Image (cartoon, grey):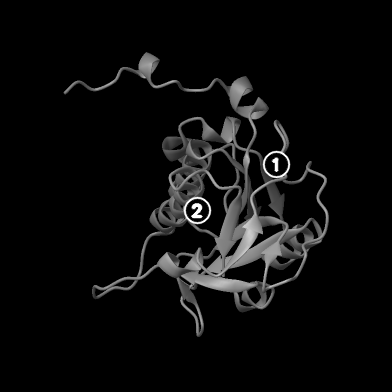
Amino acid sequence: MRKLSMDELGRKSVDEFKGSEKRPVVVVLDNIRSMHNVGSVFRTADAFLLEGIVLCGYTPRPPHRDIHKTALGATETVAWEYVETTVQALQSLREEGYRLFAVEQTEGSIPLQQFLEHYSIHFGGARAGKSPMETENGKSNENHAGTVDGKLAVVFGNEVSGVEPEALALCDGCIEIPQWGMKHSLNISVAAGIVIWELVRKHEVNGKADRFPVY
């Protein structure tokens, strides 16, 4: 067994990344403290060709060397925007046709393994080279019994206090990552990797369907 070299990995250049069709998922970071966590989320968003990241409140913003330590250049590829409050960010995303889901432990939160089994969100609308702020989107069709034509915004909260209540009130639902140990707590960069991969896996591994089934 031989490890692949960097030249064999098929990595995109910055220009190739920006010109590629993105998966219509936006990550919203709600008052994240750690620059290393922010950089790690950028790196994950780059790995899975997400549309972009919205940084809210006191979440650190590029450029900064401590973000770069974990982003490793992903701040140059992934589209990002700063919004003063998470509430403002979610209101804008809603107007652009995004469905909003927080990753949080709440009453009625849906376990991640069940999240993709309830009803469908159309997996379409991303444009090559377009950030979520640049894409022209229509309103979501709020038909919970069938298919909702729209895109996903996934909110990750502060390392200590989680997603702020005002932001939770705007979300369509909450995703919970099942845990069976003592802590029932994951680092935000780890949680982001788990949730984003599950969304991508459903689309890419299981037949490349053009829909996101979501709760």
Residue projecting furthest to the bottom: 107
- Name the residue at 47% across, 52% down: 202
Residue 31 visible (yes or no): no
Residue 145 visible (yes or no): yes
For marks 2 and 1 on the same chain, the one whose residue lies earlier in the sequence: 1
In the displayed structure, 177 sits above or below 70; it is below
Q: How far apart are marks 2 and 1 (CA)?
A: 15 Å
Q: Residue type at mark 2: give it.
A: Leu
Q: Residue type at mark 1: give it.
A: Ala
Circle 1 SS class: loop
Q: Which of 164 and 21 is in front in this view?
A: 21
Give the label on residue 14, or none. none
* Quarter of the image where the N terminus is located: top left
Q: Which of 199 and 107 is in front in this view?
A: 199
- Name the residue at 59% across, 27% down: 17
Give neighbour class at mark 2: few <14, some 14-19, many 20+ (Cα, 10 Å).
many
Residue 185 place in picture, x, y as percent: 35, 69
Residue 126 place in picture, x, y as percent: 70, 41
Q: Name the residue under label 1.
A: 126
Circle 2 SS class: helix
Q: Name the residue under label 2.
A: 199
Query: Could you tell whether 123 is left or right of 40 in the image?
Result: right
Residue 195 place in picture, x, y as percent: 46, 57
Residue projecting furthest to the left: 1
